[in-house]
Amino acid sequence: MMKNYLLTLAIAGAALVSACTKTDKEIAQANLSETADPSKSIGTVKFYELSDGKIKMDLELKFASRADSNVAVHFHEHGDCGDMGENTHGHWNPTKENHGKWGSSAYHSGDIGNIMLDAKGEGKISVTTDRWSIKDGDVKNIIGRGIIVHGGTDDYTTQPTGNSGPRVGCGVIEAIK
Ligand SMILES: [Cu+2]
Ligand SMILES: [Zn+2]
């Protein structure tokens, strides 16, 4: 009886230790909504700090009115979704590079790119990078940036926008304290 009890304790203890050493800490988030009607949610974005210092983003779209179509996602300079997303201004570009495809030789640090939405309007993408941080005063700081969802396809070449179409969705990256 006592032996079983101790064994249970040991297992519970091991589970607790592994839960505590889990290093993916959620550090920031954004709620995306329609620019035409900000009361309509179209998805969520979560940012995690990994043990190697990189940041991982999980972006999930649930955008029924855009089902079976392509949308393009970028981080824009300002965290203000007013005026149909225009208040976010242009693409956030801390490294002064050209617009382009994520992972190519030159791209903006928020050029997430095209996401194909399924018949339900759902689509997701995960990105892990050392181009982002959440440190005050760091040019790589993503906190307070806008995230724009465009109702078209990023051609990855037209400067400085990729000719991605209208701004149909928007959110602001907020720190999680
Ligand atoms: Cu954009
Ligand atoms: Zn860009």
Image: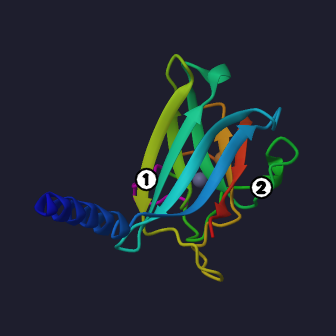
Pick the front one: 154 or 136: 136
Label 1 C-beta lies within 8 Å of the nearest ligand 2 atom: no
Q: Mark 1 or mark 2: which is in front?
A: 1
Q: Which residues are magenta?
A: 101-108
Marks 1 and 2, how far apart at CA: 23 Å
Residue under label 2, please give it: 89
Pick the front one: 129 or 177: 177
Tell me the residue at 45%/42% (across/down).
Answer: 125
Tell me the residue at 83%/41% (across/down).
Answer: 84
The amino acid beneath tag 1 is Val
> Relative to 119, is 72 above or below?
below
Q: Magenta region's main secondary structure? A: loop
Q: Quadrant of the N terminus?
A: bottom left
- Using residue 56 as the reference point, say whether residue 22 is left or right of it: left
- Please state the horizontal and vertical placement of residue 117, each as a whole percent of the image: 52, 26
Name the secondary structure under disc 2: loop
Tell me the residue at 46%/49% (across/down).
Answer: 101
